[in-house]
């Protein structure tokens, strides 16, 4: 098992692993942007195809909305998007302005995989937010990292992105797949890996996460890009008021729903009488990690907001970090985030725009 929390080492590992693939590469990806990183990933799958590797890509059109609204405003895979997608992208572009964005959005000019044997339907409407790669049906890579330059280098504002990626050789591990892994007894330390998914219209992530939060006995540490699901918020408040040490890491200015994040953080602070520790990171946290009692960890693509828990396909992986030898790596990542953060000392540190928070809660 290998854990990464920094984009350059994570993607260097991906490229090396793809070069060593012998039979197949299966990719599920939400955002695949037309930028430096996206093009390098394209070169990697084309090179694999030329070696005779079976390459299968599941790329959701919904991701194109974010591709057309943010950063380079260019989609590498999609040559057309439904009108609803265009309108949503235009709204997002205006609602979340950022210096340096191009004035015009750009779709792919044609079928990017024409002339190859790569299997990909760019018009597939899957609403799947997952980010995973499976190599030779053996090496499983799961993360919150999209194929876009800001995960590898920095965004248009010059911010580093904190995110997680895990690579695991399945021949060395027992994999518990949903729905079996929704309920995991955290008192019984195991070598098993849990996969918790929203898939085929079945939403397993919410009950899986709720189960793990409710089992916390001493500590809950959350490193999250986007929060806002009331049932989760209530559960965290309850655990904190029972005496569980609750620590939350959020971006001080998220690329999306930043005011909603701060509204929920303010609610957490108020309803726990300030017992919660909140760190606002000046870089961008794109991670989605929950650590229970300083050992069990679950992370992947699922945020703690309504879209992740009720709407989108998601993939999270869970495991006991000490058993799998990545405990120190996880704490090193948290220390790096903490050094880039400001700790909240009072509710005044959690100011937000009420109207924007309300609108973000609606969408």
Image (spheres, grey):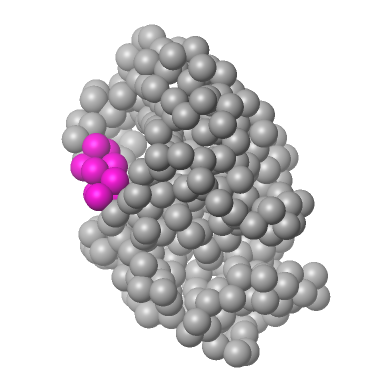
| 362 w.r.t. 89: above or below | above
From the viewer's perspective, is 259 left or right of 154? right
Name the quarter where the N terminus is drawn: top left
Q: Which residues are magenta?
A: 330-339
| 106 w.r.t. 347: above or below | below
Where does the image place residue 41, in percent across and percent down from the top left? 38, 71
Q: Nearer the viewer, residue 264 or 296?
A: 264
Q: Residue at x 51, y 25 (%)?
A: 273
From the viewer's perspective, is 29 left or right of 106? left
Where does the image place residue 106, in percent across and percent down from the top left? 60, 86
Q: Nearer the viewer, residue 206 or 171?
A: 206
Name the quarter where the C terminus is drawn: bottom right
Where does the image place residue 355, in percent across and percent down from the top left? 73, 57
Q: Residue at x 67, y 71 (%)?
A: 95
From the viewer's perspective, is 338 left or right of 104? left
How many numbered marks, from 0 up? Answer: 0
Q: Is residue 335 magenta?
A: yes
Q: Residue at x 59, y 76 (%)?
A: 97
* Residue 70 visible in rendering: yes
Q: Residue furthest right?
A: 83
Q: Is residue 337 magenta?
A: yes
Where does the image place residue 94, in percent across and percent down from the top left? 67, 76
Q: Nearer the viewer, residue 348 or 49?
A: 348
Dominant secondary structure (helix, strand or loop) of the stretch shown in magenta: helix
Q: Residue furthest top?
A: 187
* Residue 175 visible in rendering: no
């Amino acid at each position: 098992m290998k854990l990464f929390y920094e984009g350059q080492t994570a993607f260097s590992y991906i490229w090396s692993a793809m070069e060593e693939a012998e039979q197949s590469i299966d990719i599920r990806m939400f955002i695949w942007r037309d930028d430096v990183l996206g093009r390098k990933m394209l070169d990697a799958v084309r090179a694999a195809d030329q070696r005779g590797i079976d390459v299968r890509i599941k790329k959701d059109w919904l991701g194109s909305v974010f591709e057309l609204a943010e950063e380079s405003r260019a989609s590498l895979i999609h040559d057309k998007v439904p009108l609803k997608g265009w309108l949503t992208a235009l709204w997002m572009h205006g609602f979340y302005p950022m210096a340096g964005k191009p004035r015009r959005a750009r779709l792919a000019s044609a079928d990017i995989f024409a002339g190859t044997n790569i299997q990909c339907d760019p018009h597939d409407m899957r609403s799947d937010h997952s980010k995973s790669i499976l190599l030779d049906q053996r090496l499983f890579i799961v993360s919150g990292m999209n194929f876009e330059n800001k995960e590898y280098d920095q965004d248009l504002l010059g911010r580093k992105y904190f995110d997680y990626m895990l690579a695991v050789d399945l021949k060395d591990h027992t994999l518990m797949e949903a729905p079996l892994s929704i309920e995991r007894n955290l008192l019984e330390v195991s070598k098993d890996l849990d996969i918790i998914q929203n898939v085929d219209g079945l939403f397993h992530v919410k009950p899986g996460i709720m189960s793990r939060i409710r089992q916390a006995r001493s500590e809950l540490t959350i490193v999250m890009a986007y929060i806002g699901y009331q049932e989760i918020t209530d559960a965290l408040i309850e655990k904190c008021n029972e005496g569980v040490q609750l620590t939350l890491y959020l971006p001080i200015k998220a690329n999306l729903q930043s005011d909603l994040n701060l509204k929920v953080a303010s609610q957490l602070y108020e309803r726990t009488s300030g017992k919660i520790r909140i760190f606002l990171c000046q870089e961008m946290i794109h991670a989605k990690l929950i650590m229970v009692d300083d050992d069990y960890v679950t992370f992947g693509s699922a945020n703690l907001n309504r879209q992740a828990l009720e709407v989108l396909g998601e993939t999270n992986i869970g495991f006991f970090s000490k058993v799998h030898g990545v405990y120190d790596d996880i704490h090193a990542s948290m220390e790096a985030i903490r050094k880039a953060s400001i700790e909240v000392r009072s509710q005044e540190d959690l100011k937000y725009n009420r109207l924007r928070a309300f609108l973000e809660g609606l969408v």
